[in-house]
Amino acid sequence: MSSELSAPSRPARVVFYNDPKIRSIAYQLFLCAVVAFLVYGAASNAIENLTRAHIASGFGFWNQTAGFDISQTLIEYSARASTYGRAFWVGLLNTLLVAGIGIIFATIFGFVIGISRLSRNWLLSKVAGCYVETIRNLPLLLQLLFWYNAVLKALPDIRESIVIGGVAFLNNRGLFLPQPIFKDGFGAVEIAILGGLGGAIAFYAWARKRQERTGQQAPVLRVALFLTIGLPLVVLALAGFPIGFDFPQSGRFNVTGGVEVLPEFAALLFGLSIYTAAFIAEVVRAGILAVSRGQTEAAYSLGLQPRPTLRLIVVPQAMRVIIPPLTSQYLNLTKNSTLAVAIGYPDLVQVFTGTVLNQTGQAVEVVAITMLVYLTISLGTSFLMNIYNSRMALRER
Amino acid sequence: MTMAEGDLAVAQLAFVRRATIAPQPPPATMTGAIGWLRANLLSTPFNITLTLIIALLLAWVIPELLRFLILDAVWTGVDRNACLESVQHREIGACWPFVREWLPYFIYGSYPIPLRWRVDVFFIMLAIGIVWLLWLNAPRRDIGTVFFFVVLPIASFILLSGWAAIGLQPVDTVLWGGALVTIVVASVGIVFSLPLGILLALGRRSRMPAVRTLSVMFIEFVRGVPLVTVLFMASVMLPLFVPEQYSPDKLLRALIGIAIFASAYMAEVVRAGLQAIPKGQYEGAMAVGLGYWQMMRLIILPQALRITIPNIVNTYIGLFKDTTLVFIVGIFDLLRTIEVARIDPKWATPVTSTTGYVVAAIFYLIFCYAMSRYARAMEARLARGDRR
């Protein structure tokens, strides 16, 4: 057997159209050409269609007077004086408001349900399981319509308002709550709140550093609770309660004074929180189950009690698994808040992509701005998530 | 036996049992129903409290539900008067005669009544296609796949929208409605999202920078915005982008929006499956001289899709629920027909809305629950294959 190695031969010659490199470049050029052609076609058609329909283009409408009312405004807004740009900010703030409060409720509720599903109590885990299965298998829009039309709109009308504790009224126009009015001297309380928050964060940082150095623990939770809640209360008492309430007054046709919580807002908040909570519950359950049983057993064999085991061993490891999908649930909740348009809550889509688009007819600009807002939120969050993930990832050797 | 000391010790004792006692049954409080109750419901004071609270809650909710759906429900009647509170009927439950009258509308929308057999044929064909595709022991599943992804879409399109040349009277899509539209939208999403999603996922993992960049941009863009805005884009921007004479009709626009949205999500699901295939499979395929498409078609995709079936079905569940959003761009899907029916003055009562929503809830629950059971069964089946 001759096993002489021949000198390395030159690569076999291939016809140019079979060369993978040339082929790949040709494919890509072709694809780019197709995309460019589609974009060009779409743009030229759009320009032609818009000129034929006499629709202005550009962002000039941003500073025009809006001329329509919005039922819930967090910043000053009036139909006559405010611009479309202002309406955009009102809508965006409403979206962020409902998303923010919804995220808090959904998180609390979702963690409770998720942990309940793992409970040793048979009844509790079955009820939690039923909740998750039912809610996850029903469309969110159906749930929103149910809360809005079948529950909140079915409340008694204004003359038969349900009075809660003599100070709040609930009827089919919304929930009317007393509005706190801050008198002189409340500034001290505000300073106390800020100082308490800052103090709590500083104490947490100090306690953590000390624990890493010496292993000694500090009662972080108790101190933080005192600083954030106790301190402002003490200052409030010392300043002689500089706070008053504007109580709602029930009239024949209207409720005056107080803060009004719109039924649209309440329905959207209920629907989003309850729906997202079911998904968060599954995330939490999966996260806790992902911590292997050996971790708990090892902690027990080191002599840790069940409670410290949960706090020091299980939860930190479960959080590593829970947080990425939890963030995507938060994003889903924010994106789902666009369903507000179906029940008439004035969120970004309802105000901007709905009313402003209808009034100006500038579909391209309006839809592009709306999409840009949600894209910014989504991509910003996933950017932060990537940083978090790279910091939390298990350092494997 | 040879331990003398041991024998001595035994001899000095007054009594030693020489035979083992027959094992006694565990105490009655630890076994059977009582034992189960103690272990699962009443183990600690905290658990006892929880159990009591939940039992009270259930004792309140379940009878309420039964009363609303069955006991206090109205079963006969011709208009709203049957479902109003009266002296004989203090508590009023669901108003079922309302559903009976509106049911054809919930199923077919405004589809012309003499032509509704075509919708029925469509439903039957779809059911056959689904069973053929999902039932793993069905005969000739390859033909089933072709039937579902090629024959069915074309045949249903001809059947539902009509074709004058073969004697089927055309029906404008404006008349379609109810469960028909919901199922059409969901099916279009399901049929189009898988192939498009596979292409996008392959594009995202491609080594050609232009292909990869375009796929990533498309996927991230669509996944970053809410479905409502995609639908708005499809319904208000799409007509601007095409010459006026080719402007697609309303339903088609919504279908395009749904297909775009679903395929971006499907791409990520498929990508996860592709990433789970070990590198050796790619290298093995290349070593035996397969080209890219042969490698994908014969080696990689069959394995990748098999392990992603549960996730694909879960995406379909999400898609099925998301079809309700076409409501917002003015398509008469099931939910929209219920919204129309519930404000009908002939049946306007305090319970009409809830009754309508119960019907929709049952419809969606049945479909989504069936799909999730299937996904779970598939997961179990795949897990069985991997068990050693």
Image (cartoon, rainbow, N blue to C red):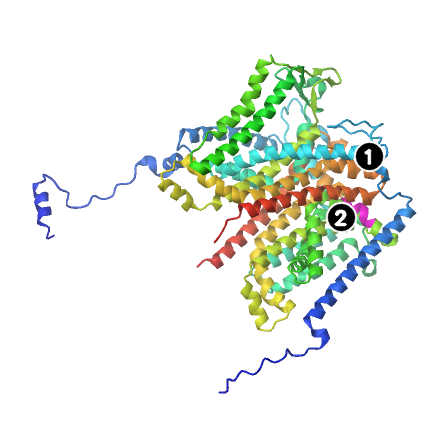
Q: Residue furthest front?
A: A213
Report the magenta stretch's main SS: helix
| Image height of B316 relative to A75, above or below | below
Q: Chain of mark 2?
A: B
In the visual, does B17 lie left or right of B158? Answer: left
Identify the disc placed on residue A84: 1
Q: Residue furthest bottom?
A: A1
- Which picture quadrant has residue B137? bottom right
Q: Position of residue A335 (x, y in %)?
A: 68, 41
| Image height of B285 relative to B384, above or below | below
Tell which tag, 2 or 1, sits nearer the viewer: 1
Disc 2 and disc 1 in contact, CB within 8 angstroms:
no
In the visual, does A74 lie left or right of B66? Answer: right
Q: Is A93 a magenta residue?
A: no
Question: Residue tagged by mark 2?
Answer: B254
Q: Is residue B187 visible?
A: no
Part of the protein shown in magenta = B232-239
Q: Position of residue A8 (x, y in %)?
A: 59, 80
Q: Amino acid at mark 2?
A: Ala
Q: For numbered disc 2, what is the local secondary structure?
A: helix
| Circle count | 2
Q: Residues within 10 Å of mark 1 (few under 14, many from 20)?
A: many
